[in-house]
Image (cartoon, rainbow, N blue to C red):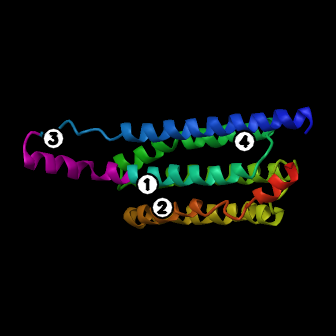
């Protein structure tokens, strides 16, 4: 392994730690949005029930944000496992990606505060699409610069790159559905956030083969 490859590998390890830290902070910020309404008295059973009902949209927004942040974190872990080296441009893509992730609490705050306003879901969808677009260029750059593990199937990488555009189109349609029914848009967004749990599964690495090569 050359000195440049060692530096690229070390940089990738640091990016992985930075990635985990940003996700941890994002999840913490989501919890901070669950504040008790000031106009409701919680000292009686009826008052507490009324207060919890009033907080229902924020709880649902919290559920949506956890699904989005959690699924993207799992997806990023799977993809980063397939990447061995990092360079300057990859760092830029990662910073853009994590900046968008860190704004997730704000987009979900809009949905929790204004659940009947379709623009809240459009804003959420726009940020989700931006994450997808950045992901496409991220994956494309890693493939062109040969930053992946040597056992990764490049055909699977290309398919993953192209699938980002289809995902973006679906997100755009779900956002548009909010103008007909915000509840429908919410349910579709919540269900669609399960998709990232499957992204990156095709980027498998034969670690047994790699260990044999090292011996």
- The spot of residue 195 in percent (x, y) is 57, 64
| First along the sequence among labels 4 and 2 | 4
| First along the sequence among labels 2 and 1 | 1
Rounded to the nearest angstrom, the CA distance separating label 1 from label 3 is 25 Å
Which residues are drawn in magenta? 43-61
Q: What is the chief secondary structure element of the magenta stretch? A: helix
Rounded to the nearest angstrom, the CA distance separating label 3 from label 4 is 45 Å
Query: What's the mark number on residue 93?
Result: 4
Foreground pick, 154 / 160: 154
Q: Categorize mark 3 by other alpha carbons within 10 Å: few (<14), some (14-19), many (20+).
A: some
Rounded to the nearest angstrom, the CA distance separating label 2 from label 3 is 30 Å
Report which residue position mark 3 lands on: 40
Residue 158 picture quarter: bottom right
Report which residue position mark 2 lands on: 189
Report which residue position mark 1 lands on: 64
Label 2's element?
Answer: helix
Picture residue at 50% right of the left edge, 44% below the top: 104
Contact (Cβ within 8 Å) of mark 2 with mark 1: yes
83 left or right of 145 in image: left
Picture residue at 63% right of the left edge, 63% below the top: 167
| First along the sequence among labels 3 and 4 | 3
């Amino acid at each position: 392994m050359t000195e440049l490859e060692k530096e690229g590998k070390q940089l990738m390890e640091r990016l992985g730690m930075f990635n985990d830290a940003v996700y941890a902070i994002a999840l913490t910020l989501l919890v901070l949005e669950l504040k008790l309404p000031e106009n409701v008295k919680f000292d009686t059973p009826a008052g507490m029930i009324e207060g919890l009902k009033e907080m229902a949209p924020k709880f649902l927004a919290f559920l949506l944000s956890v699904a989005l942040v959690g699924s993207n974190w799992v997806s990023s872990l799977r993809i980063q496992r397939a990447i061995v080296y990092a360079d300057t441009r990859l760092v830029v893509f990662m910073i853009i990606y994590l900046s968008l992730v860190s704004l997730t609490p704000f987009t979900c705050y809009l949905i929790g505060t204004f659940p009947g306003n379709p623009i809240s879901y459009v804003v959420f969808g726009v940020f989700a699409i931006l994450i997808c677009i950045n992901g496409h260029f991220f994956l494309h750059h890693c493939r062109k610069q040969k930053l992946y593990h040597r056992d990764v199937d490049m055909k699977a990488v290309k398919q993953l790159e192209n699938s980002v555009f289809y995902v973006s189109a679906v997100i755009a349609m779900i956002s548009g559905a909010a103008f007909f029914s915000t509840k429908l848009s919410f349910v579709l967004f919540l269900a669609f956030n399960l998709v990232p749990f499957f992204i990156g599964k095709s980027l498998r690495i034969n670690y047994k083969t790699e260990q044999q090569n090292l011996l």
